[in-house]
Image: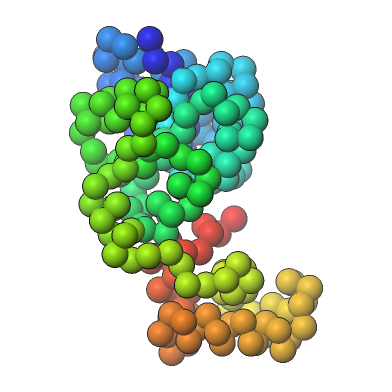
């Protein structure tokens, strides 16, 4: 029997998925959660074979939960199930040690097959997303440019952003300018929109 942890903040979707997975003779959902910051504690308590995580959840997102699971409960394999089929998220998930990445609209039979493969030590990735990720490539932004571009979502001034990030205004301006140029954008708002669409920015907390 392959035991599963299911973390998904949409209650109806989580319940329906758990019910469908439990119909499979070799799969059992042993714990259901609605928050990302509950994942590690539950995994330590139940020691599931596979954790199925959404990306967007209260507390911490699924990618951060996956990184923590890799350190704290390395015997639990992690799969991401998301509506956000963005290449940047796939790159981030692989870096976090995720073994599976599927879009939520995949049929349950396909999901069950993927779970069995992941439990057996294989990696499973949605083929369309894998192709998009290969053609798109990794983010061209440095970690600092990513941090500053994400901070610019609040539409604050350069001085306000600099205070919040504990950097000089000149440093913020230079990194922001570099990020805008790398993304081929005309404004910082356009740069943010482009980076978010590709999954290159962390989700807003």
**Viewed as shown, does residue 12 lie left or right of 43?**
left
- Residue 111 x/y as whole percent: 27, 30
The answer to whether residue 81 of the structure is visible from this angle is: no
The quadrant of the picture occupied by the C terminus is: bottom right
Q: Nearer the viewer, residue 167 or 117?
A: 117
Relative to residue 91, is residue 22 depicted above or below? above
Residue drawn at x 46%, y 82% as measured from the top left: 182
Residue drawn at x 46%, y 33% as measured from the top left: 78
- Residue 50 x/y as whole percent: 44, 25
Q: How is the image coloured?
A: rainbow
Give the quarter of the image for residue 183: bottom left
Residue drawn at x 47%, y 29% as measured from the top left: 77
Relative to residue 74, is residue 99 depicted above or below? below
Residue drawn at x 28%, y 44% as measured from the top left: 126
Give the quarter of the image for residue 13: top left
Q: How many marks?
A: 0
Relative to residue 30, is residue 40 depicted above or below? below
* The residue positioned farthest toward the front in the image shown: 121
Q: Nearer the viewer, residue 202 or 20?
A: 202
The answer to whether residue 7 of the structure is visible from this angle is: yes
- Residue 9 x/y as whole percent: 46, 38
């Amino acid at each position: 029997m392959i035991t599963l942890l299911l973390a998904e903040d949409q209650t109806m979707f989580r319940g329906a998925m758990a019910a469908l997975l439990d119909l499979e003779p070799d799969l059992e959902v042993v714990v259901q959660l609605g928050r990302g910051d509950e994942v590690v504690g539950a995994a330590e308590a139940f020691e599931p074979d596979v954790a199925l995580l959404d990306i967007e959840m209260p507390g911490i997102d699924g990618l951060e939960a996956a990184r923590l699971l890799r350190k704290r409960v390395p015997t639990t394999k992690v799969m991401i199930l998301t509506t956000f089929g963005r290449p940047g998220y796939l790159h981030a998930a692989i870096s976090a040690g995720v073994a599976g990445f599927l879009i939520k609209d995949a049929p349950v039979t396909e999901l069950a097959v993927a779970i069995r493969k992941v439990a057996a030590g294989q990696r499973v990735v949605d083929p369309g997303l894998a192709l998009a990720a290969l053609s798109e490539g990794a983010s061209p932004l440095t970690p600092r440019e990513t941090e500053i571009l994400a901070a610019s979502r609040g539409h604050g001034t350069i001085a306000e952003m600099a205070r919040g990030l504990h950097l000089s205004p000149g440093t913020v301006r230079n990194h922001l300018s570099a990020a805008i140029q790398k993304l081929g954008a005309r404004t910082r708002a356009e740069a943010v929109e482009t980076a978010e669409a590709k999954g290159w920015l962390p989700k807003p907390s």
